Image (cartoon, rainbow, N blue to C red):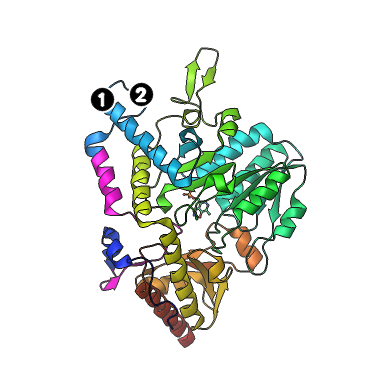
Amino acid sequence: MSIVETLPLDAETLREDFPILSTVIHGDRPLVYLDNAATTQRPRQVIEKLVEVYERQYANVHRGIHWLSDHSTDLFEEAREKVRSFINAGSAPEVIFTTGCTMAINLVARSWGDANVRAGDEIIITEMEHHSNSVPWHQLAERTGAVVRHIPITEEGLLDLDAFDELLNERTRIVAVGAVSNVLGTINPIGEIVRRAHDAGALVLVDAAQSVPHDKSDVQAWGADFVAFSGHKMLGPSGVGVLYGRLDLLEAMPPFLGGGSMIRRVTLEGFEPADPPAKFEAGTPPIVPAIGLGAGIDYLEAIGLEKIHQHEQLLAAQAHAAMEQIGGVRFLGPAPDKKAGIISFTLEGIHAHDVAQILDRHGVAIRAGHHCAMPLHKRLGVVASNRASFYFYNTLDEVEILAEALQDAKRIFRRR
Ligand code: PMP
């Protein structure tokens, strides 16, 4: 059943930039890569940039007074500027390079959290958070005696904003929320959440790991205080991520890690920290991964984020419609028009790992398990689920292969 005839992007042509996408596995199965929420693939333009830097432009940054170090520093700072413009941050020092989204959230929980959260204070997260945006807050609560509270989800898989209003009070110090759920695909109303949290005097951290790679982002329009995301989910190498923080907050926060680069002065008695961003980039930063991320951003901007978002939503809508025909599919999360290009589901009577294994025989790569969201799975009453997640290089043909492979899984298990 076809509800989508054409897509806004010519994915077949774009795929030519991605060497890995022409892989054939198990003898004759073209790889159908639908695990993009875990990590995306890289185009030749990013891979070539990495090679070029290592072959001709690499030295440590902010250190040497020599030509190569200056050159490498320029490339690294250009990458910071690309990230700044990509998310519309107000200034470059508000962009901190970390090793990933997880590190960025931990940085805030440790640095801002330890300095500002006290026993009896409250931290609000949601029932749909990735463990990266729940465990650091539980750890902060353990260290300080604060309490972690949760915005519940509705039966539809949306955040219950009335319940959020009831949770907010004068003890709330921070609200940490994902922009897009990595399981449900739900697109959360971040601007509205920030407005309500700020009215209550609380800060907001946005886990944007699943939104920045897929849709236009404007951290100033959101009004968020902190935003975290990872490079490897948006064409960049692994090992680099970003923390955006409001400059006045970053200036007031103590450094998280100590070491080289993050100081203005060190004496036998102690140290004086540098200004942001250096204050939060102790040691040698992820130099080449950051430059690679910059190349990934150039690629995404050349395509256009609006088109990417549309393309993925249409693929998800088509997948939804095709999977509905199979019977026995339970979708986790809201209808396609309220979510990003992520479809999590269970297939009645078949364990998620078995489904993923049968799909793999068809060349289809999807995720199976709890997707680092155990509390959410408990809330939904499922031990494990499957997740197909799309990017701009996926095609309607691949959606068809996914649906056929699911039919096959059902056939195989009916026979048993
Ligand atoms: N938050 C969300 C919503 C995610 O999907 C992920 C990655 N699965 C993370 C945080 C953590 O990202 P990373 O492992 O790159 O630090």
Which residue ends up furthest to the top in the rendered image?
Answer: 268
- The span picked out in magenta is 25-53
Query: Which quarter of the figure is the N terminus placed in?
Result: bottom left
Residue 373: x, y in percent?
57, 58
Residue 410 lies left or right of residue 165; in this view the side is left
**SS category of the residue bearing label 2:** loop
Front one among 367 and 197: 197
Closer to us: mark 2 or mark 1? 1
Residue 281: x, y in percent?
46, 32
Tell me what residue is drawn at x 29 percent, y 58 percent: 18
Which residue ends up furthest to the bottom in the rendered image?
Answer: 415
In the image, residue 22 sits, relative to residue 5, either above or below, namely above
Residue 199: x, y in percent?
72, 45
Amino acid on which the number 2 mark rests in the picture? Arg
Label 1 crowd (10 A; few <14 / some 14-19 / many >=20): few
Front one among 415 and 147: 147
Residue 120: x, y in percent?
77, 40
Residue 67 is tagged as 1
Q: Which residue is mark 2?
A: 63
Q: Quadrant of residue 365?
A: bottom left
Tell me what residue is drawn at x 57 percent, y 62 percent: 186
Label 2 crowd (10 A; few <14 / some 14-19 / many >=20): few
In the image, residue 404 sits, relative to residue 345, either above or below, namely below
Residue 315 lies left or right of residue 118; in this view the side is left
Note whether residue 36 is visible.
no
Note whether residue 115 is visible.
yes
**SS category of the residue bearing label 1:** helix
In the image, residue 112 sits, relative to residue 8, either above or below, namely above
